[in-house]
Image (spheres, rainbow, N blue to C red):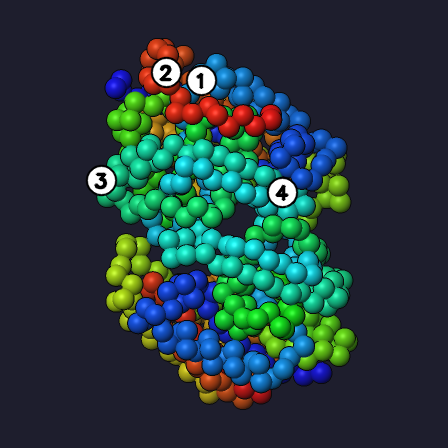
Amino acid sequence: MAKGEIIAGFLAPHPPHLVYGENPPQNEPKSEGGWEQLRWAYERARASLERMKPDVLLVHSPHWMTQLGHHFLGVENLSGKSVDPIFPNLFRYDFELEVDVKLAEACCAEAAKAGLVTKMMRNPNFRVDYGTITTLHMIRPQWDIPVVGISANNSPYYLNTKEGLSEMDKLGKATRKAIEKTGRRAVVLASNTLCHWHFHEEPALPEDMSQEHPQDYAGYKWDMRIIEMLRQGKTKEVFKVLPQFIDEAFAEVKSGAFTWMFSAMGYPEIPGDLHGYGTVIGTGNAVMEWDLVKAGLASKRGAAKKPAARKLKKAA
Amino acid sequence: MPVVGAYLVPGTPLPYLVQDNPPWTSLVAGYQKAAKSLAEKKPDVLLVYSTQWIAVLDELWQTRRRVQGLHVDENWYEYGDLPFDLRIDTKMAKACVKGCASVGVKAKEVDYDGFPIDTGTIVAANFLNPDGKIPMVIAANNLYHDPGLTEKLAQMAVKTANGQKKRVAVVGVGGLSGTIFRKEINIAKDKIASESDDKANKKLLGLMRRGDGAGLKKYLPDYAGAARADMGMKHLSWVMGALRWRFSGAKVHAYGPTYGSGAAVVEFNK
């Protein structure tokens, strides 16, 4: 078996508004549109992913928050209706996904070896969180690539940012090892918003874009500063200011996905490709891509193995 | 109409899912005693607030007439599923949505098939109201509401019930000290995570037992910080708001650990 590789990472935020704005058949509520700039950003990301043809998508979501360790979806097929508890008016989505259980188990084992508490989620009735589903829908609405879903342990909130993110760093390194050992060509997805200051009341028509704007100017400026550094490939500098960014912009990257993704990729000092930025109920969201093949950090060869399955041909 | 009953109960699914685990059996028994007492009080409606139903925009109220399904807890899924079948007092819930304006809060109805009812609400409903006979009004825990505003919401809900001539029992669902063990434990040997948490929990419960509302109010902020109390004990604010801090004492039907965190079943006396 050829050694597996991470071929790309995406910052792939999960506001359910983007699914609502797109009106896919899986989502029950229908909209007049809205948040086009972010949705067009995802269209560009989708085109990149299509070219990459990964075997698997790994997503770390802050909306599967776990108290006891880091958890991994461990049931091959999961389906159901996901209703967002915060925005049930916008997101009532019928999902069906295939899990790459072998890779999930490998990630779980490697993370345990690294000293983290880990668990495989084996309950077939489990309802996948809306963060995972939104990110996966926005990046690959065909649902034809197996996934690995990873929970966000609450350590950054329960302990402190430094200790919590150091766990996410270990989790990222363990994820990379598992990918290498299982021979997968993988894409890692950080399901995180940047500045997370948000409105406290929803506009009467949620998709009325005349009401959409950054909630906080200082938070917006922080987002621009972080994005500019990421565009220039100043990864070390970003991680140096990350705790301050988290504190001052209430940034959702605190939950760990961003650190996990960069750790898995080896903190490459390469320019990120910004597909777009926009606010959703005032929060700052960037869709960004780090193509490790283009940067010469992953091989150009075809998939190390045939995709485990591409059988879930859902309507886009 | 009076508040005919007031209860503080845990929202963790552990005692419900593993009822024979020795450290949790007293919580199960405590819940059963509370259920018996509640049935005897014959309320028209249960006014429920669970720390685990999180809202961030507006105040949410469940308004679907009947909510059924199967829930799996995102942390403790390995211990089993949580079936639920809740009847909602839609008329009163909708009146509470309207009533929120009187306390300066924007509110919304939640009436969606498949809406994810939180673990705490399900556990409390299944223990206290197992056949679903008593209609419920369920309010969300808006993270941006402080304890004072939570009290006002409960007062508004009681006033709404009075307006509809309904006997209400109020239920606050949540834990006590919030520290859980961060490594896997043998659940048969579960205990409160630290002596200081245990001491703080017992002090809090002692104030409730003695009916010392003023002392309880004074101690709560310190307790919430020192014991990492579940959501700053806003579920207690809900109960105290409904009672206007007037109670003569409390029966602590049970107190015990749930993976290190503190949990108690408490019934407040008039």
Which residue is denoted by mark 2 in the rendering? A303
Q: Which quadrant holds residue B150?
A: bottom right
Which of discs 1 and 3 lies nearer the camera? The answer is 1
Mark 1 and mark 3 lie on one chain; the one further toward the N terminus is 1
What is the quadrant of residue B89 in the picture? bottom right
Q: Which of marks 3 and 2 is in front?
A: 2
Q: Mark 3 packing: few (<14 Cα in 10 Å), some, or many (20+)?
A: few
Residue B262 coordinates in the image, percent (x, y): 38, 69
Q: Where is residue B187 in the image (x, y as percent from the top left)?
A: 29, 63
Between the residue at mark 3 and the residue at mark 4, the CA separation in whole angstroms equals 38 Å
For label 1, the residue is A53
Is tag 3's residue or tag 4's residue first in the polypeptide sequence?
4
Q: Which residue is drawn at 68% across and 74% down?
A: B158
Which residue type does callout 1 highlight?
A: Lys
Cα distance between the residues tagged 3 and 2: 27 Å
Residue to which mark 3 is pinned? A113
Q: What type is the residue that disc 4 sits on?
A: Arg
